[in-house]
C-alpha cells in the first residue's frame, strides 16, 4: 500500500521551528516516475527518485490536529509520465514528505489536468507543533463574504448618518 512518510529533515525542521517564531512552509508538490519503478519510501529520503514536474500548492486546509489536505493541479501541458511518487517540499526546497510504495498503481500525466488532493499527516511530531497558516477554503469564503457584507452595511450606516446630520443641521 502506498505510504506518505514525513522525512527526517521535516521532523528536525518542524521540531526546531516549534516555539521559535519560525515556520516550515510547505509550498510545492512534485511528481515523479520513481525512475521507472515502484519503491518503498524512506524517512532519510531527501529527493524523489526522478522528479518530473513541480507545482505550487494551490489550497490547503486543516483536517485534524496534525493533518491537513493539500491540493494542486498539473495542467495538460505537463510532460506525460507514469506517476509513482509524490514529494511535498518546503520553501527552502527540502523534501518534507514523500508518497510512494511498492504497489503503487501508476497514473498518467499529460493531455489532461492531473489533480492532486492529498492528506498530509504529521504523526512523527507532537500534536500542536503543526500549524496550517492557511484558511479552510469554505470557512475563508464565508468569512470573506461576511466581511464584505459588514463593510457595506457600515458604509450605508455612515451614509445615512451623514444624510441625517445634513437634514438636522447638526455637524
Image (cartoon, rainbow, N blue to C red):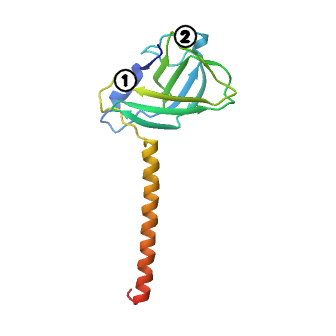
Q: Is residue 93 above or below residue 61?
A: above
Rendered image quadrant of residue 38: top right
User: At 29% from the left edge and 27% from the top edge, which residue is drawn?
Assistant: 126
User: At 43% from the left edge and 88% from the top edge, which residue is drawn?
Assistant: 167
Q: Which mark is residue 164?
A: none
Return the disc, 2 or 1, that comes first in the chain's sequence.
1
Q: Are marks 2 and 1 in contact (CB under 8 Å)?
A: no
* Residue 40 spot, x, y in % from top left: 48, 11
User: At 49% from the left edge and 13% from the top edge, which residue is drawn?
Assistant: 101
Q: Badge 2: few (under 14), some or many (20 or more) residues near its Cα, within 10 Å?
A: some
* Residue 34 spot, x, y in % from top left: 57, 14
Direction from residue 100 to residue 114 in the image, left or right: right
Label 1, secondary structure: give it.
Answer: helix
* Residue 152 spot, x, y in % from top left: 46, 65
Number of callouts in the render? 2
User: At 40% from the left edge and 84% from the top edge, which residue is drawn?
Assistant: 165
Q: Quadrant of the C terminus?
A: bottom left
Mark 2, residue position:
38
Rendered image quadrant of residue 10: top left
Q: Badge 1: few (under 14), some or many (20 or more) residues near its Cα, within 10 Å?
A: some
Mark 1, residue position:
11
* Residue 161 spot, x, y in % from top left: 41, 78
Label 2, secondary structure: give it.
Answer: loop
Q: Is residue 76 above or below residue 124?
A: below
**Nearer to me, 21 or 80:** 80
Q: Nearer the viewer, mark 2 or mark 1?
A: 2
Disc 2/disc 1 C-alpha distance (Å): 25 Å
Amino acid at each position: 500500500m502506498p505510504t506518505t512518510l514525513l522525512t527526517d529533515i521535516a521532523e528536525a525542521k518542524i521540531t526546531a521551528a516549534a516555539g521559535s517564531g519560525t515556520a516550515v512552509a510547505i509550498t510545492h508538490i512534485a511528481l515523479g516516475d520513481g525512475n521507472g519503478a515502484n519503491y518503498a519510501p524512506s524517512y532519510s529520503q531527501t529527493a524523489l527518485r526522478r522528479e518530473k514536474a513541480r507545482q505550487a500548492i494551490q489550497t490547503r486546509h486543516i483536517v485534524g490536529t496534525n493533518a491537513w489536505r493539500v491540493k494542486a493541479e498539473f495542467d495538460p501541458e505537463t510532460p506525460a509520465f507514469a506517476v509513482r511518487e509524490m514529494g511535498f517540499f518546503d520553501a527552502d526546497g527540502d523534501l518534507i514528505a514523500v508518497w510512494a510504495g511498492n504497489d503503487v498503481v501508476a497514473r498518467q500525466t499529460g493531455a489532461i489536468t492531473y489533480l492532486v488532493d492529498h492528506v498530509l499527516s504529521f504523526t512523527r511530531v507532537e500534536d500542536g507543533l503543526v500549524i496550517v497558516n492557511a484558511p479552510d477554503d469554505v470557512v475563508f469564503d464565508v468569512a470573506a463574504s461576511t466581511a464584505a457584507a459588514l463593510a457595506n452595511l457600515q458604509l450605508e450606516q455612515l451614509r445615512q448618518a451623514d444624510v441625517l446630520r445634513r437634514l438636522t443641521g447638526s455637524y
